[in-house]
Image (cartoon, rainbow, N blue to C red):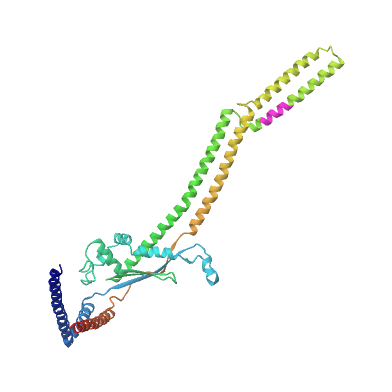
Amino acid sequence: MADLSAPINGVTRRASGAVMPRLRYRISSIAARCKQFLTIWPARMALILVPSILSMTYYYAVASDQYQSEAHFVVRSPAKSDVSGGMSFLVQLGIVKSQDDSFIVQDYITSRDALRALAAKIPLAEFYNRDEADFIARYPSILYGRKEEQFYKYFKQMVSVIHADKTGITVLKADAFRPEDAHRITETLLSLSEDLVNKINRRLQTDAIASSKSELEVAQSRVIAAQAAITEFRNREMIVDPQQSAVALSDLLANFSAELAAVQAQIAELKVSASGSPQINSLLRKAAALTQQISEERSKIAKDSGGLAARIAAYERLVLEREFANRMLGAAEVELLRARAEAARQLLYLERIVQPNTPDHAILPKRARVVVTILVINVLLFGLAWLVFAGVKEHASDGR
């Protein structure tokens, strides 16, 4: 086995030794040619100046003017918060910025929903395809196709929204190839943002009041059911108020008892003074009738089923249920008023600080800035390439 492996290892070492010098030679040759090319003065100037000349030619001879319309707004809420110091009077006036909701509006303006709504209100594609627009800046162009996603990317390049955390002011800028087009885009986007804020307000009111309204409807249904139960009880029992009937029955029993006591007193007196008087039998019959009447009236109260006591208990339960329902109704009405007041405090407002302007001068594109930037980038890239080629050549020389 040792005899067979030795020749193979020797061949491998000779092959690798032959490949590495050729690879180093090729790298050194490429580096030398690149350096030779870069050392030629016209070639260096071409690498540096040609991109700048091309950009200058486009921006100063071809690129069309773009007008920018600008508007400032703030999203605020009348809700009061704990603010001390010199800002407290602003809070009392309701001038409180709502930063989170400003971000909502900012995100909406640059969203696909806003693009669709904007395109439905104004001929947006026509605005960006004016005759005065150049072949690169217009839509569609060689950079942006006719698909909806391409149009959305182009729209985000033409519209910008910047929010300042310190002031709470949001700046909306819209670019177009005509001043009136830029103004119309900005004005429509602000109107759509106001519609969004109003939609959020309606949702806040609906969510805050819906639960209270539901509780109020339940309380009203409970009051109606309690009153219907009392009415049904009165119709069934033929009694308006069992408690009043009990009072009247008690008075009747008291009168019967007093009359029975008087009759019994007369009987006792006659038995003493005139035991043979015929009035005694008549009084005894009257006393017996009064006793029976009293017993019957008392049975009406104490009867197990259908008695006045059971009716009073059932009626009192119904009255108590109606009282609880009325209290629940009153609490639900108070809660509804509180919910409406709370919803009113949570409303949002989009206040326009600076109205959209109609520009009279094109400020875009920034021609000088772009050309100088391209020139600086070319110089930096040329220097970086020089360093890379120098390092490659040095590495190749060391490999030899």
Q: Residue furthest right?
A: 273
Left or right, residue 68 beside residue 57? right
Q: Nearer the viewer, residue 294 or 248?
A: 294
Question: Which quarter of the rendering shows the N terminus?
Answer: bottom left
Q: Is residue 248 magenta?
A: yes
Q: Is residue 73 shown left or right of residue 341?
A: left
Q: Is residue 260 magenta?
A: no
Q: Which residues are magenta?
A: 246-254
Q: Main secondary structure of the magenta part?
A: helix
Across and down, in percent, residue 118 comes to 31, 62
Is any part of residue 88 visible from this angle?
yes
Q: 59 or 320, which is in the foreground?
A: 320
Residue 49 seen in this snapshot: no
Q: Position of residue 190 (x, y in %)?
A: 37, 64
Query: Quick check: 308 above or below 176?
Result: above
Can you say whether 335 is above or below 124 in the image? above
Residue sitting at 53 percent across and 52 percent down? 337
Q: Is residue 165 left or right of residue 220?
A: left
Q: Position of residue 181 (x, y in %)?
A: 29, 68
Depicted 227 relative to depicted 64: above or below? above
What residue do we see at 73% from left, 27% from top?
Answer: 254
